[in-house]
Amino acid sequence: MCGIVGFTGKDQAVPFLLQGLQALEYRGYDSAGVEVLSPDGELHGVKCSGRVATLAERCRTANLVGTTGIAHTRWATHGAPTDRNAHPHLDCSGRIAIVHNGIIENFQELRAYLARTGHTLASDTDSECIAHLVEDAWAGPAKGDLVEAVRNACQRLQGSWGLAVVCADAPGEVVVARKGSPLVVASTPDGAYAASDVTPLAPVTSHVITLDDDQYARLLPDGSVTVYDADGAVVDHPGTLDIDWDASAATLGGYPDFMAKEIAEQPEAIERLLKNRLGEHGIELDELSMTDADLAAIDRIYMVACGTSYHVGLIARAIVEEWAKVPVVCEFASELNYKEPLVTPHTLCVIITQSGETADTLTAARRMRGMGCKVFAITNVLGSTAARESDGTMYVQAGPEICVCSTKAYTAQMVAAVLLALRLAYANGSMRLEEVQQHYRNLCTLPDLIREVLKRSWQDQQAAKLFRNAQSSLFLGRGVNSTTAAEGALKLKEISYLHAEAYAAGEMKHGPIALLEPGFPVVAIVPADHVHDKTVSNIQEVIARGATCIAVATDGDEEVAKLCQNVLWIPEVPEEDFVPIVAIVHLQTLARYVARSRGCDVDKPRNLAKSVTVE
Ligand code: F6R
């Protein structure tokens, strides 16, 4: 949901700003813009609707010169994605520029006030108000101090912001502010940097300063960074974070797109997560920050997440209930926020969020905490808000996920949830150590099984051809694989714009069967499990109506091979509950091939953003 970057230092600002925007483009790509403070003492900028590549092209002809600047890539909330609504936004004098990520909730009131007091607003956005409020403060109470001016302006805002500001009358300074939208800054010998997350900073430093809500920072060209609190007092020891991501992890590295790269990275991601997890007393999960007694006392778990991460929660619910015998409620965060959860003194809330910044998930976590729950986060992004606000955090260590649709974080989050289930089951006496060890050994086979599926991507490429003339499609599965069906359908929808509906296979006859007609593509997940024969019956029903069935089946399944035109084969998986972690790899790859055959940009699907920081 919008990415912001800022730089002040020795070198020209534009190359880093554009590179930074490219790294953050997964956050939004409706429009983009850059503003630099030039040697003539004026602000000069370029902004346009469209992608960062379009902005880069415009910057080449505009020849922007200057060593201090800010930039933005937008996911529109207020105001259409047009040139004039693109950030940066300027004040009336054109000497103050801002970029903003978040939502200003009282913008209507502020716009009316600004219009009344003689300001001219040039866009339809909520963000532009901030530039004019900084303008007022700069000329008034801030007495020429940019941090004070920004602090003063922020006091009038309601909502959320990650903000970067430059002012032609404060040469060399970039001031940033944070409330509710992520922001990190870095101090280096070559200059000081700011960004919405660590991805653009990985090539320049391995150490960043993480701002808390209601904090501000002044960045100077000598690389110094000073952090201030809500009252304007200097914060002596701001939060810091070491980035252990190799900068090349956020580049394509020879793959045609990030989705292909991230699908291929799944075996290594899971290996990293599983490394050194088995100890004398079962699964090592120190991140939980809970004693065995605390864990044994848990009487209910809320799994809370959105989108793909919610699908992790659904599968985790089945496994935790089966192994740890603890009842689990799995809720969309956006739904839980308007319900009254049944919380006991021993309820654990597990939030699952790749980005760690999803607004609905964070709101739910805060609410559950407010009700006395301990909150445990399963997340991928280092230093994310979810990690910082939770009682315990498990990083899934999948590395930066740049493609907007989630792939490697999904499978890594599932493995993390399985580890949590094992830890709980052992702590509360539902599982013996030998059983834990066996499950762990089985988990450790998954990377190689996924490698095997990756080698079979030609099967997905073949199957993708069956979607050529489709207007819609149906995904079916039973048990944990009804969720695999849901996740496969979500992948297909979001990147190929082809409608896909997911259903528990046994429910098909209660409605969706009416959709079937000759050539209609149906994907059925039918591994060798305890419901195999039931799912085969559903496949029969599909075929009897002339629909085209694409099965995901286990090697050697002659029955399915005879029935279906196309089979996406998976090797035998040692536990039924782990099949979703292997089978989904075919469906990710299938979705990618379908999307590419329809000419879609798989990494940047329309209307979506990687981190949804608005409710
Ligand atoms: C789908 C996808 C989204 C996210 C959802 C939650 O491929 O990526 O559905 O899963 O927006 O995001 P996180 O996990 O960052 O909270």
Image (tube, rainbow, N blue to C red):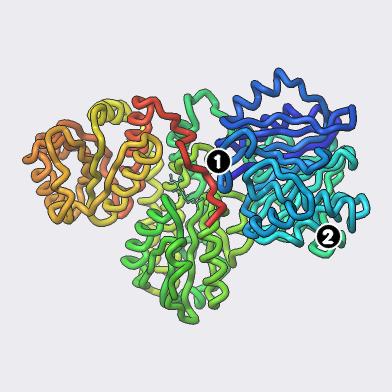
Quarter assignment of residue 296? bottom left
Name the residue located 79 percent from the left edge and 42 percent from the top edge. 92
Residue kind at label 1, given as amino acid type? Ala
| Residue corresponding to mark 1 | 80
Residue kind at label 2, given as amino acid type? Val
Q: Position of residue 149 (x, y in %)?
A: 84, 53
Taking the image as drawn, is residue 452 in sight?
no
Name the residue located 78 percent from the left edge and 43 percent from the top edge. 91
Name the residue located 75 percent from the left edge and 34 percent from the top edge. 35
Residue 122 against residue 505 in the figure, above or below: above
Name the residue located 42 percent from the left edge and 61 percent from the top edge. 332
Helix, strand or loop status at disc 1: loop
Helix, strand or loop status at disc 2: loop
Horizontally, residue 168 falls left or right of residue 468, namely: right
Residue occupying the far top of the picture: 61
Taking the image as drawn, is residue 545 in sight?
yes
How crowded is the residue under tag 2: few (<14 C-alpha within 10 Å), some, or many (20+)?
some
| Residue corresponding to mark 2 | 235
Q: CA distance from mark 1 to mark 2?
A: 38 Å
Q: Position of residue 164 (x, y in %)?
A: 75, 45
